[in-house]
Amino acid sequence: MIISCKKAAKLVSAAIDHELTLYEKIRLRLHLLMCRFCRRYADQIDLLHQVSRSIGDSPLNTSAAGLSPEAKERIKKNVSED
Amino acid sequence: MNSKNVFTNGAENAAEGGTATDPALWVDEHADALYRFALLRVNDPQVAEDLVQDTFVSALRAVDRYRGQASVRTWLIGILKHKVVDHFRKDKREITASDLGHESEESGQEYFDEKGRWKDPPRAWDVTPESLLEDKEFRHAFTNCLDDLSPSFRDAFTMKEIDGMKGEEICKVLGITATNLWVILHRSRTKLRKCLEVTWFESGE
């Protein structure tokens, strides 16, 4: 039985989180061979998987706003009072 | 309490070039980085600030145990990570039945037709992870799309995809089963992908 794109997408995601059964792996691989949309989906999900990890690990994204000077003073005050 | 003594006693041997002996200096040097780390994950400036403060308080108390085995920054981030997870644990919202959907509907209807085919197939993206990560605007688009997820989905996605936590641990933190988690992650990934496709990849960037 040929699986649908909906099922294939679910398996693509599942494969990141847990081991697929052999049956599932084969079905997914066959579907991806035949379906360029799901191949794109799989590539893009993998891309986001890598990007997410890097964003988490990155030297803390200095383009984002940091704390205001007032906030830092607040923290210093609260920390030294503790 | 003379906090300067607490610091010099504990951190004498571990201090980096002597700058690590004053809590105020630690705040100056590390607070921004800790704040950004927290804000990405908890999506709330006040909560992020509180977690940063709690981290410094804990660090002060634990400074005797810091032996310079990692950089001060890494050590502080380690403390902060635990506080972020504690926040997720305390803050876990009721994950409703409608969040999880029925077996046949998981991340289904909005994206696929009744035969399970794509309603709106994925476009081709012509990028590498590196090219995306270099782009500050992409990071904004990414966090905006992340913020679009419902809070419990966002927390689960953050723990799994951003921090690489094990499924088992995430389930404990959120009080859900592994199957629940997989459904949540699938929906989150699909939604995030779609959001980025619309806001980033298709907007002429």
Image: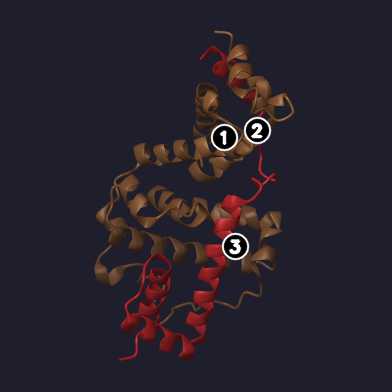
Q: Chain of mark 2?
A: B
Please provide percent x and percent y for residue B56.
55, 26
Helix, strand or loop at mark 3:
helix
Ranked by sequence position, the earlier of labels 3 and 2 is 2
Quick check: B152 above or below B10? below
Name which residue lies at 45% across and 38% down: B82
The colour of chain B is: brown
Helix, strand or loop at mark 1:
helix
Distance CA(mark 1)–CA(mark 2): 8 Å
Q: Quadrant of residue A52?
A: bottom right
Crowdedness near tag 3: few (<14), some (14–19) or many (≥20) residues, C-alpha within 10 Å: some
Name which residue lies at 45% across and 51% down: B159
Q: Which is closer to the viewer, label 1 or label 2?
A: 1
Name which residue lies at 40% across and 37% down: B86
For disc 1, the marked residue is B76
Label 3 is placed on what type of residue?
Thr
Quick check: B130 above or below A1? above
Ranked by sequence position, the earlier of labels 3 and 1 is 1
Asked whether disc 1 touches disc 2, contact meaning CB atoms under 8 Å apart, the reply is: yes
> Foreground residue, A62 or B147?
A62
Distance CA(mark 3)–CA(mark 1): 35 Å
Tags 3 and 1 on a common chain: yes
For disc 3, the marked residue is B199
For disc 2, the marked residue is B30
> Foreground residue, B161 or B74?
B74
Label 1 is placed on what type of residue?
Leu
